Amino acid sequence: MKFVALVVIASTQYEDRLKDVAKEAGAGGGTILQGRGSSLGEKKSFFALTFEGNQSVIIYVLEEKLSRVVLKSINAEVEKTQAECMAFTMPISHVVGLDRELIKKFEDSIKQEDDL
């Protein structure tokens, strides 16, 4: 069974909606990091303070097939709402600490797909 890290980087205003979309597509919990973005474009300033936008980074560890479903759902939401977002997957070669029930669920879903 192969796992990937699905990384979603979005403006904080879209964070809750994108988490809901990922959950509806089958993703469990993720880890959320807060950050600031930078760009090559014109920067917004207010009283000499520069704002480049707050970003949320949501990281999910998912089974490879499930990650495609979740990524497609996020893409559909981004296209529909024009949300400021980027999402991508990265392969994971080794992983420890996953919930055993989650692993069993992935194994069962793979067996069901193979039976079809």
Image (spheres, rainbow, N blue to C red):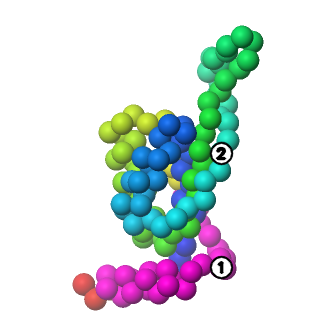
Please tell me which of labels 2 and 1 falls first in the chain.
Answer: 2
Q: CA distance from mark 2 to mark 1?
A: 23 Å
Report which quarter residue 90 is drawn in: bottom right
Three-letter code for the amino acid on which mark 1 is drawn: Gly
Say left or right for 80 vs 55: left
Q: Is residue 112 magenta?
A: yes
Snapshot quadrant of residue 109: bottom left
Task: Tell me the crowding category of disc 2: few under 14, some 14 to 19, or many 20 or more residues within 10 angstroms, Cα based.
Answer: few
Secondary-structure class at tag 1: loop
* The furthest residue to the right: 48
In this view of the protein, which residue sits in the foreground, 23 or 9? 23
**Region rendered in magenta:** 89-113
The residue closer to the viewer here, 92 or 28, is 28
Residue 102 percent coordinates (x, y): 49, 80
Secondary structure state at the residue bearing disc 2 = strand
Q: Which mark is residue 97?
A: 1
Q: Which residue is mark 2?
A: 34
Q: Quadrant of the C terminus?
A: bottom left
Asked if residue 80 shows in the view, the reply is yes
